Image: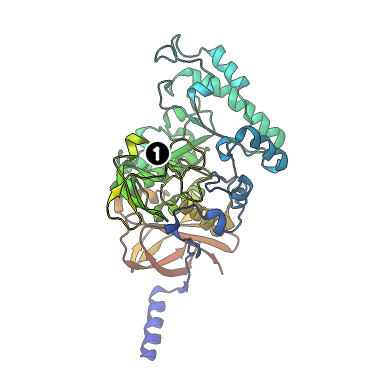
Amino acid sequence: MKLFFIISLSVALLQTGVAQTPITFVDPIPAAYNPMEVLPKFADICPDIKLPAGHVYFKPPTKQGWTVEQVMAKGVTHWSRGSFEKPETQMEAFKKKNPQFATREYEAVPRIREIFDLPPPVGDKWWPNGFLNEKQAREKGKTKPIHARLWVGETMEGTDWVPSGEPMWDWFYDEFTKRYEEQKKKDGIPYYVAHNYFEQLPQNFQLAHEKREVLEKLYETPPEKIDAGQYSVGKSIGKPNTILEGIYISAPDQTPQQLLAALVRMELVTRMGKYTGMFIFNVHEWRPGFPTQIEYPEGTFYRTDKLPIDPNLQILVAFLSQEYGTIFIEWGLMPYQSLTKKPVAFNPEMHKPMDDWFAKGSTKETDFPFYHNGESNEINTMPYLGDMTHFGIVLWSQTGGKVAGGKFAYAPYKIDGKEIKTQKNGSDLIASYYDKRGVVTTRTLGKKMMICYFNMFADNDRYTLLVQNPANPSETFTNVVCGNGIHATLVNLR
């Protein structure tokens, strides 16, 4: 039997003509993680990390007792007013104590009324005299504070909405971004200004809403000739240097298309010379899904809320935000969650019909005794509470982060012997969507290469993956893959 195995292996190697190096994918889940605790854990169980220069990660301290300094030691790069329990007194003290973080402020989704300091509306009209003229808009751009080096607006919704094609935006951003540029020249610290937390690019950027050949041609179009609508040079919102992807997934069966579409746009936005990344709300913006079970000494509580995104995909999205872009912002996390899981955030209209409480030893449903509305440190029962996405950031820091700045390339591969070739124009993500298959990305720096495989259409069967070094076809790497999560590792090249 042993002789037969050796002969078979030799024949296989001769047939492929290359040596196959076994690899081990990095497990992103810490051994100490226990999701049944329904409390944030990442700052307690994950190693300290530092992301490479130019990479951005925002998340508040999500557990009572944690500090801004503590989560920043875990890789978070920026803080906001909402990162503090008592911002009025704590923000300035934090900056004085930690001068290295003073320029890491995040201006978190100011609305138009805050951006332009609008007076209260007349009835329901925020603009009774029309939008700003050139003089007014430029004056706002000249005087708006620029101390937050990460600035992401909330400008495409609300009753104070101003269409992105209005000229007042161009006048405002002309002055606003000019001052950011001057500030950067003085201190060398990068800035990121995004008009809105989600993009509104034209249809030619939209996977599944445009023909395959039209999308593929975008990868062959010179960056300066890409039609990006109002984001194009010379247009109303063309001056902000950042375009973010809002990761707000609808129905679960739409997930592969929506995530791949986001990655396609990120590739194209990067080719345009803009910064990009992801702004995620890690539940399905669809409808209430299944209940989350929370155990108390006094009984068992069930809350039905929006369905969380698959934990595999939460890890994947955070990882890919750094590989296809440089920015990851997580929205919707309540800071400083109560250690006792009490009181519980409560909206009567939303929660009362869908909450269930069973006192210990009872099979009869009664009213939940630990509701509160508006108290600090109240618990949000959203599953995972930012842990999964943090695991994705840590995984990237251990693999892709080690070769940041290296050469990115898609790699040809075989999956259970079926050969998958790369696209000559780099449109592998489009092929992934239309052919319903995975992709392998690599990033190489010196003699180290990151290998990353993901397939958003995958089932839960096991498949043998054989990856070819795109720069050296004689060098291949192999392991087993399974599921729709991220498979990543760092290898040494010959």
Residue 215 percent location from the top left of the image: 36, 41
Q: Nearer the viewer, residue 65 or 67?
A: 65
Counting every numbered tag in the picture gives 1
Residue extending furthest toward the top: 129
Indicate the position of residue 466 as horizontal and vertical percent values: 41, 67
- Name which residue lies at 48% across and 18% down: 167
Tell me if residue 74 can be seen: yes
Give the answer, above or below, for where 346 lies relative to 309: above
Give the vertical position of 202 relative to 330 (above or below). Answer: above
Q: Secondary structure at mark 1?
A: loop
Say which residue appears at 42% left-offset and 51% top-offset.
314
Q: Quadrant of residue 407?
A: bottom right
Give the residue type that dot 1 points to.
Phe
Q: Which residue is mark 1?
A: 346
Above/below status of 134 relative to 156: above
Position of residue 352 relative to residue 180, above or below, is below
Q: Nearer the viewer, residue 88 or 384?
A: 88
The residue nearer to you, when weighing 159 against 141, is 159
At horizontal 30% and vertical 38% (from top left) the residue drawn is 209
- Whole-percent x, y for residue 283 in the image: 38, 45
Q: Quadrant of the N terminus?
A: bottom left
Instruction: Tell whether 484 sits left or right of 322.
Output: left
Asked whether the viewer can see residue 486, the reply is no
Q: Residue furthest front?
A: 361
The quarter of the image holding the C terminus is bottom right
